Amino acid sequence: MVTAEETRSATELREQGYTVLRGALNPVEDIQPLIDEYGVVLDKLITSLHSEGKIPHQFLGLPTLDRLAAFVAETGDKFFEHLSIHVAFDSVDANRPMYLHPEMFNLLRNPRLLDSLEQFLGPEIAVNSLHITRIKPPEKSLSESVQGSPNGAISKTLWHQDLWAFQTDADDTKAITVWVPMVPADEENGCLLVVPYSHLPGELAIHCKPSERRPGFKGIPDEIVSDQRVAVPCEVGDVLILDKLTQHSSLENTSNRLRWSFDLRYQPVGQSPGQGGRPAWTARSHSTPGSEMGSFEEWETMWRRILAHEAEVGVTDHTRFSLDNPICV
């Protein structure tokens, strides 16, 4: 039975391009296990890098969140792939590091999360392979090169629409972004900004790539983004849902606290994932439960096969920059 709250959320997503599911996840049962797992993985990574002489110290005596912030602030994107759930289309290394660990898989298949997504996607839910890990220490703690980087995983995220990162065969796919904060996100530490109703024209805006004139810029030029911008603070356990065409960015982290979140992508089973041959896998199916990916081992094996295949045949970046637009050059 569909509740009044679910009807409101589905209507908000359809009409304004975003909605917030307050308390969709349990901070203790659903979020904390992943934080704890990151702590273990981070400890092993730091110990290994220090023993190899790749980092000068081990950030000892800090709780997990502070240690994560200090490590990322110190190393930038040098070792970030070890903490990232996504592998970019710029490498053909079959052994490239990636965050493949059980609690990450458990979040992707979290029953509470999937229950909340049925109102948008129906009972047949697939997980798209396009996810982004965002670990953002206070901006003032980052090096100038990281502050000026356009990748948005460590520093401020610039204006964009998520469809920009899908191939054209997914234009009609009903993909949504599921934004999950691991710590409270507010205007001080860099919560998301959205432009309500910006999805309604149904098309991609101009997206520029870094250029000689603006080497630190990637995305929709600020001057063509509407002034009707809304900050969306979220607590741990809240989930922000975005239409793939909703224009959004993040504020700069001006606080002394870490901002950490995941951009997860979901879609109906059977629709094109638009990720260069990387498949979408079934997380929930009422009609054929046997088709669901049921274990971390399956998920890890899938990704190892993807990376091995791409190492063999190569990959092509498919993001859709507006290369010839005068505003971009």
Image (tube, helix red, strand yellow):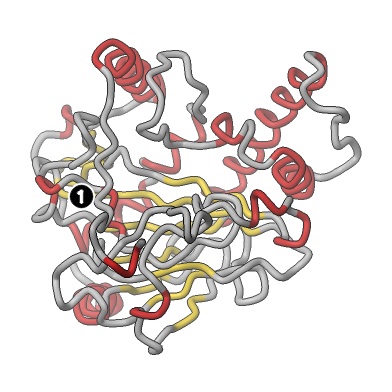
Assign the N terminus to one quadrant of the image: bottom left
The residue at the point 24 percent across, 30 percent down is 278
Give the image location of residue 82, x and y in percent: 58, 29
Q: Nearer the viewer, residue 274 or 63?
A: 274
Residue at 29%, 49% in the rendered image: 165
- The kind of residue on which mark 1 rests is Gln
Q: x and y percent of residue 189 in the render?
A: 66, 68
| Above/below status of 278 relative to 2 | above
Element marked by disc 1? strand
- Write down the residue under mark 1: 267
**Left-right relation of 219 to 127:** right
Q: Quadrant of the C terminus?
A: bottom left
Name the one closer to the observer, 126 or 137: 137
Residue at 60% of width from left, 56% of height from top? Answer: 148
- Pick out the residue farthest to the bottom: 228
Say how many tags the image has. 1
Residue drawn at x 18%, y 41% as measured from the top left: 273
Local crowd size for mark 1, using a 10 Å CA cut-off: few (<14), some (14–19), many (≥20): many
In the current view of this chain or complex, which residue is farthest to the right?
Answer: 61
Relative placement, left or right, of 231 versus 246 is right
Where residue 94 appears, as percent x and y from the top left, is 40, 14
In the rendered structure, the answer to whether residue 117 lies left or right of residue 1 reads right
Above or below, comparing residue 234 to residue 33 in the picture: below
